[in-house]
Image: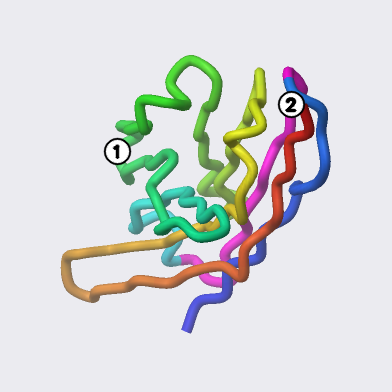
């Protein structure tokens, strides 16, 4: 079992910045892909940003140029730097650790609320 603990959410005005962190409880962090997802009320959970073990990244179009995902394998932590925040970024943000090769893993954090006021 892997525990993912997110932090860094909060209330910010439009145009502001937040940095989310997600710390994993086990050393498998370095062999897993990491991702940030979000879910707004009444909407499906969507991928925001992802980073593979090799460092390649993927972002949803609406956050490109504003959000940056990074990871520190020594600290088993993944970050999401969010700049130029917009009210439509308001959601609960979840951290995901996934490994599709054996041994397979798929774990989620508890979520952290991000609210952007206009």
Please tell me whether mark 1 sits on a helix, a strand or a loop. Answer: loop
| Left or right placement of residue 83 versus residue 78 in this view | right
Residue at x-position 47% and y-position 84%: 1
Q: In this view, does 90 lie above or below 81?
A: below
Q: Indicate whether residue 111 is drawn in magenta.
A: no
Residue hosting label 1: 54
The secondary structure type at the circle numbered 2 is: loop
Q: In the displayed image of the protein, which residue is found farthest to the bottom?
A: 1
Q: Which residue is drawn at 68% across and 58% down?
A: 112
- Residue 99 bears which disc, if any? none
Residue position for label 2: 17
Q: Which of 60 and 72 is in front in this view?
A: 60
Q: Earlier in the sequence, mark 2 or mark 1?
A: 2
- Between 9 and 42, which is closer to the camera in this rendering? 42
| Residue at the image position 35 percent from the left and 34 percent from the top | 55
* Residue occupying image coordinates x 61% and y 50%: 91
């Amino acid at each position: 079992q892997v525990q993912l603990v997110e932090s860094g959410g909060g209330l910010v005005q439009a145009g502001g910045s937040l940095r989310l962190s997600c710390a994993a409880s086990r050393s498998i962090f370095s062999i897993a892909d990491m991702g940030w997802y979000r879910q707004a009320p009444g909407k499906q959970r969507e991928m925001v940003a992802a980073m593979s073990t090799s460092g390649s990244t993927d972002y949803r179009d609406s956050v490109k140029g504003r959000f940056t995902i990074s990871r520190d394998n020594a600290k088993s932590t993944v970050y999401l730097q969010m700049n130029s925040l917009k009210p439509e970024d308001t959601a609960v943000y979840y951290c995901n650790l996934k490994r599709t090769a054996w041994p397979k893993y798929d774990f989620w954090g508890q979520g952290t609320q991000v609210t952007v006021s206009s």
